[in-house]
Image: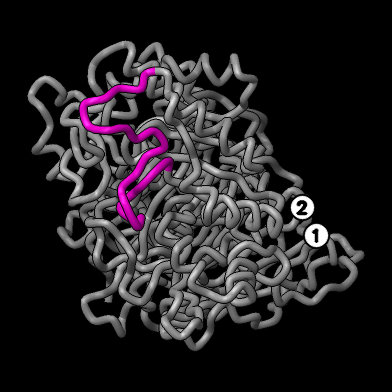
Amino acid sequence: MRTRSKALATVGVLVAASLAYPGLSTAASPSHHGADAAHVWITTPDGTDKMADLGTVDFTTTPSTAPTVVVDPGRTFQTMSGFGGAITDSSASVLYTLTPQARASAMASLFSSSTGDGLDYLRQPIGASDFATSDYTFDDVAAGQKDYNLKHFSIAHDQAQILPLLREAAQLNPSLQILATPWSPPAWMKTGDSLIGGRLIDDPKIYRAYATYLLNFIQAYRANGVRVDTITVQNEPQNRAPAGYPGTDMPSWQEEKVIADLGPMLHQAGLTTKILAYDHNWTEHPNDAASTPPDETADIDDYAQQVLDSSAAKYVSGTAYHCYYGDPSAMTALHDQYPTKDIYFTECSGSQSSDPANTFSDTVKWHARNLIIGATRNWAKTVINWNVALDPSGGPHTGGCATCTGILTVNADGTVTRNAEYYTLGALARFVKPGAVRIASTSFGTTGWNGQVMDVAFRNPDGSTVLVAHNENDNPQTFAVREGNETFTYNLPGGALATFVWRDAPRPTLRPVDPAGWTATGDPAGPTDPCCSGDVVAHAVDDDASTRYSSGTGQAAGQYLQVDFGKALPVRQVVFDTGASTGDFPRGYAATVSTDGIHWTTAVSAGIGTGQFTTVNLSHGSARYVRITLTTAAPNNWWSVADIRAYR
């Protein structure tokens, strides 16, 4: 792994007994149609609250005047697979410094779904990584020798500590899944005959031997009681100069050759292990780009696409990403290109801040924005941190990161500290169950920090709704959450990460329309003031409530905003949402609809806006175009639209 730069900016329903959430009382489900309350858990950046159960907040049918997040289960996205970290060689070694009783307690705190975080997805190194007590693979031979038939293959190293911990984790959480990743093939397969640096020898016998090596690993783990659900063929394949630890330069064309051999091998062995491509940063690190050979520059920021466009793609289930450079939006961009391929987020380490006193706060804020909410809002099925446990110095490790933090710290006196990552992961893992589906929710915050409330929502297989929200501002902010016609309002502490859970939400009577392909026009087209030149009309239909269209000037009769659905649709309702700019609603308006852009019918002749949502109900059959035109001047108020939603 490559350490990321911490450029960081300066929460009832008592869920039914079938939901064994830590710290959650149980009671019978409400019998009426609609949610009574949402149960709230909070982590604050100062550590005053750490996954604290703060009781419930009531739903009401009275709209809130606070900026309101709209949760819409009628629009669904990815199915979630799980959340977790990695029992690296280093993690195993520090956990084994504990007494058996203390180690069992630490493991339960990580994996138990009734008393701990309920982590249910682990990414396991195949051989040594930068977090290991020595450099090794499972088929090491003397320098200059080859072992094409893998006669020396053995997982004995992992049988001592790693495999027992993996079996214990699976006992604690039967939903546990495992992703396996190598940092280096055996040295005899590589140029340079070393685990550190180099690449696979370009020889069909080597590709087949390496694929067989990976297959043997999966089968050996299975024989030892551990199922490998997913695999990548190389960790960080564009990190060509690992800092003293095992690593491999694997260009996309070599990855394709390995996958082309491994895919059929898995099928022939009757294994269902999925293969993921890439397993590196959201955007290629500049140092990696600079070291790219001149004839392989096509891989720069296009590595996953190269693999997914190749003949090996038929064996690839999805793509894996890390956090150390770039932005989570890269995952949405890839999803839009290859919508049938899954997205996994597979590594991000916590890191000590320059002032260690700020580490907990900085980690809560950065991980909340970029991983817990940022990754999941950008199609990631998993959120996987790095080491589950390290010692107080961030080790042991071989080269690489000297400031990394684990989910737990195992102290010299045998005590265990739960770090910020424990609580940020817990905000998801304790409540979002395998098979949960991400559902639509408007979100006002950004991964880059804009001081607003950022959120993501899920619907569990049992029907419960989970909303995870983060206040990006250092000051408390009041916001509201609405599902159907019911709303709750909450004052979220500065910087806090919160999880809300509720049941029995009302079934919607209208179905949302997917906004993909919508366009908009308006007059004015946006502000002329340089302060807000980004508030263009296209942002009204970009399905992102953290951006907006603004008039950039006081409201005046004749100003308009028009949405084009791309084709005539049987739309029954259109909502113009100001987002966090709740005062920028139209003081007076008319709404008209058209199927052809020429002939128009009046839907609202004299509407008066009253707050965040301007709702236009339609009763004229199909519409392709909906135009809202201001009829009242308000010189001191801009007009803003952050999101337009349509319902059938």
Q: Nearer the viewer, residue 91 or 557?
A: 91
Q: Are marks 2 and 1 in contact (CB under 8 Å)?
A: yes
Residue 609 image position (x, y, % from top left)? 52, 62
145 magenta-colored = yes
Label 2 to label 1: alpha-carbon separation: 8 Å
Q: Nearer the viewer, residue 432 or 224?
A: 224
For label 2, the crowd category at 10 Å Cα-Cα, with few meaning under 14, some 14 to 19 and many 20 or more, is few
Q: Viewed as shown, does residue 225 lie left or right of 553?
A: right
Name which residue type carries label 2.
Gly
Q: Is residue 354 visible?
A: yes
Q: Nearer the viewer, residue 346 or 164?
A: 164
Q: Is residue 608 visible?
A: no
Magenta: main secondary structure equals loop
* Callout in the foreground (2, 1): 2
Residue 34 image position (x, y, % from top left)? 81, 62
Q: Measured along the vertical axis of the image, is residue 431 above or below residue 222?
A: below
Q: Which residue lies under the disc numbered 2?
A: 463
Q: Residue at x 66, y 52 (%)?
A: 170
Q: Residue at x 39, y 31 (%)?
A: 233
Q: Which residues are magenta?
A: 126-148
Residue 206 image position (x, y, % from top left)? 32, 18
Which of the marked residues, 2 or 1, is nearer the chain's N terminus? Answer: 2
Q: Which residue lies under the disc numbered 1?
A: 504
